[in-house]
Amino acid sequence: MDLGLKDKKVILSGGSKGIGFYTAKLLVSEGCKVAFCSRNSESLKKAEAELNSIGRGSAKGITANLESESESLGFSRKSLEFLEGADILIHNASGFDHSGDEEGWMRSFQVDMMAGVRLVKSTIETLKESDTASITFVGSMASKFHFGSPPNSYGPSKAAMRVYANDLAQHYGKDGVRSNVISPGAVWFKDGSWDQRKKENPKFYAAVEKKIPLGRLGTATEIARVIAFVASPAGIWINSEHIAVDGGQVASVD
Ligand SMILES: NC(=O)c1ccc[n+]([C@@H]2O[C@H](COP(=O)([O-])OP(=O)(O)OC[C@H]3O[C@@H](n4cnc5c(N)ncnc54)[C@H](OP(=O)(O)O)[C@@H]3O)[C@@H](O)[C@H]2O)c1
């Protein structure tokens, strides 16, 4: 199946590693031009070189800390300059608060929520010009089940993201802009958060694996494929959706 991604212009927050990087690899190999960001210029350079070595689309890494309003807006401005337009916005970076302290709450809401709002506001007029525009948020199944103590801002910020994505879909549908959330369950990739947990607490990791009907954690490629499909022109009739990609980890119907 042709996803229709060739020559599409993509703004992807995060992307130097993890699910964002696997998504960027897939998009570049489908012929997209991708602008992505991270706080670390060294890892950006490395990721950019690897993405540009794929030889189909192209990629540019932009240094930005999405906790900051001006850096978030700077990321979208530089992305639009590089891409000369935009068809797809993917908000993937997260503040990853698991502490529940004041700083963690602020970081989650700045990165998961407010950076998403700022990226949308600063790109929406350009997205409207595309005939296949989409906005995709990377959420988490923590937006629908108890993820772990102490109570913290990770799940609540991902839940707020789902409400915002629905608002966007309802409001901008008339302009041809779709909006959806993809929520992964636990995902293993080398040097990722679950790789770290596996090393630090193998018993806990094994218990999580056992709870997943398929008997293992997801992979970053498996998540990236769903993100790419939903964001692509091939996914054009998916709008205003929250899509779980968790291998059945969360044992509920809706
Ligand atoms: N991994 C999982 O099991 C899992 C499960 C459910 C949902 N998710 C969701 O999937 C998304 C990606 O997770 P991941 O596990 O792939 O994370 P990751 O490996 O830590 O990668 C996160 C990416 O975002 C960038 N980033 C983080 N904070 C940033 C900031 N303040 N400003 C700019 N860039 C920033 C990181 O680069 P720098 O650190 O260099 O800035 C990196 O490129 C997140 O939204 C997460 O909530 C992940």
Image: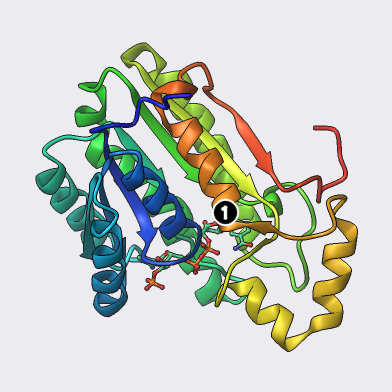
Residue at position x 29%, y 61% in the image: 37
Give the vertical position of 130 relative to 21 (above or below): above
Looking at the picture, how far across and down is residue 99, in whole percent?
A: 64, 77
- For mark 1, does the 10 Å Cα neighbourhood hold few (<14), some (14 to 19), or many (20 or more) residues? many
Looking at the picture, how far across and down is residue 110, in whole percent?
A: 42, 60
Residue sitting at the far bottom? 200
Visible residue check, residue 139 = no
Residue type pointed to by label 1: Ser
Quick check: 210 left or right of 174?
right
When asked about the image quadrant of residue 16, the answer is bottom left
Quick check: 90 left or right of 175?
right
Residue at position x 35%, y 16% in the image: 176
Quick check: 28 left or right of 110?
left
Looking at the picture, how far across and down is residue 93, in whole percent?
A: 44, 59
Secondary structure beneath dot 1 equals: helix
Give the vertical position of 160 relative to 147 (above or below): above
Looking at the picture, how far across and down is residue 23, in whole percent?
A: 44, 50
Residue at position x 19%, y 30% in the image: 126
- The residue pinned by badge 1 equals 157
Give the vertical position of 102 relative to 72 (above or below): below
Of 151 and 9, nearer the camera is: 9
Of 249 and 176, nearer the camera is: 249
Residue at position x 84%, y 77% in the image: 204
Visible residue check, residue 114 = yes
